[in-house]
Image: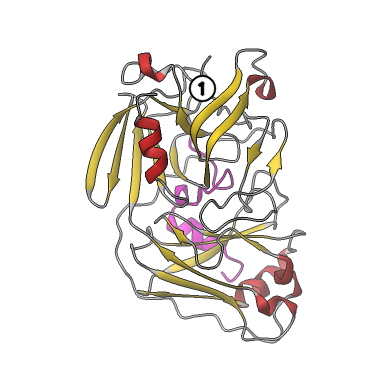
Amino acid sequence: MTSGANIKTDHTTHVRVPYAWAAAGLCALALAGCSVLGAVRPGTGSDDKAATNAVKPAAARPAQRPAGPVPAVLADAHVNIDDGAVVGVGMPMSLVFEHPVPVAERAAVERALTVSSTPRVTGAWSWVKDRNLLDGGRLDYRPREYWPTGTKVTLRAGPGSGPGASLHRRFTVGRSLVATVDVRDHSMTVVRGGVATRIPITAGAPGMETWNGVMVVSNKERRLLMDSRTVGFGDAYKGYYNYAVHLTSSGTYLHENPLADVHAGRENVTHGCVGLPTDGTARRFFEEVIPGDVVRVTGAPETVDPGNGYGDWNVPWSTWLAGSALR
């Protein structure tokens, strides 16, 4: 069978997704959320270009101090990063609300949130249209460039009063890992700590291409059921796949695929996922990757939307700033 599907729909019968895609609990590193059944609605591509990969500390933007009580909506906000977690350099902070925040109330929500980091890093909040949520259901924070390794970040709501003032997170950015998939030459170059490794892969076949652009690892599964019937491919495949690294809420994974033993480095034959050989290549990548690591795909026709997983890096910085209610 071919690899698990990408083509703008969820390709597994049992997918675990992070809070930014569905409200649920998560563990410190897996960042896994609730299970969903069946396909989700199609998304569309974006013409935005990915932000630069350069990592440079920058002066912090002056903190917005809360004026008055912290909005109650923050009391039920779900944060995609657990307190004390270690994440990759691409992980945005993502808040998902129980109910969509009206436009008139969004500025107050942003003013109530303070982000501080060591070293100081320029970053900003932006309202993201999540593919599985109504408008106003998700608010993300990302730096202008990837987080510097070793950065310690604190998020808090306050020092105002109110039920939302209890929101507080601290996390650390770990070592840098950025994997670049070139679908044209069927390879993936993994750069970890400045050391590059090239791996043969097979990506989406014509008509079922892998998403282009920057994606961020949300969680990973040692073994995952994938079923073609959830995406309209009939009985093309159904089975468990190993070493599945989750990239988008529409169902894009990077995982072990027996077809890669023959086609990796030669041609693209999957239904949209990135397939790795079964000779230990997939297992090694799985073991070294953590949530927040970056997978960047080049050479494919359509760019992943910002709200399809953590596609925030596909938004130019000026556009990202314009997505804040404070501008």
> Is residue 159 inside the magenta stretch?
no
Q: Amino acid at mark 1?
A: Ser
List x then y, in percent, for residue 299.
37, 29
Residue 139, by quadrant, is bottom right
Q: Residue at x 32, y 16 (%)?
A: 266
Residue 200, placed above or below residue 151 = above
Q: Residue at x 40, y 34 (%)?
A: 283
Front-lying residue, 21 or 192: 192
Q: Which residue is mark 1?
A: 3
Residue 322, placed above or below residue 168 = above
List x then y, in percent, for residue 117.
42, 74
- Quadrant in which the C terminus appears: bottom right
Using a 10 Å C-alpha cutoff, classify the residue at mark 1 as few (fewer than 14 neighbours), some (14 to 19) or many (20 or more).
Answer: many
Q: Is residue 1 left or right of residue 188?
A: right
List x then y, in percent, for residue 150.
34, 66
Q: Residue at x 46, y 80 (%)?
A: 62
> Is residue 313 inside the magenta stretch?
yes
Q: Residue at x 63, y 50 (%)?
A: 129
Task: Please tell me whether mark 1 sits on a helix, a strand or a loop.
Answer: loop
Q: Is residue 271 left or right of residue 201?
A: right
Instruction: Name the magenta segment's main secondary structure.
Output: loop
Q: Which residues are magenta?
A: 303-327
List x then y, in percent, for residue 137.
70, 56
Residue 250, placed above or below residue 324 = above
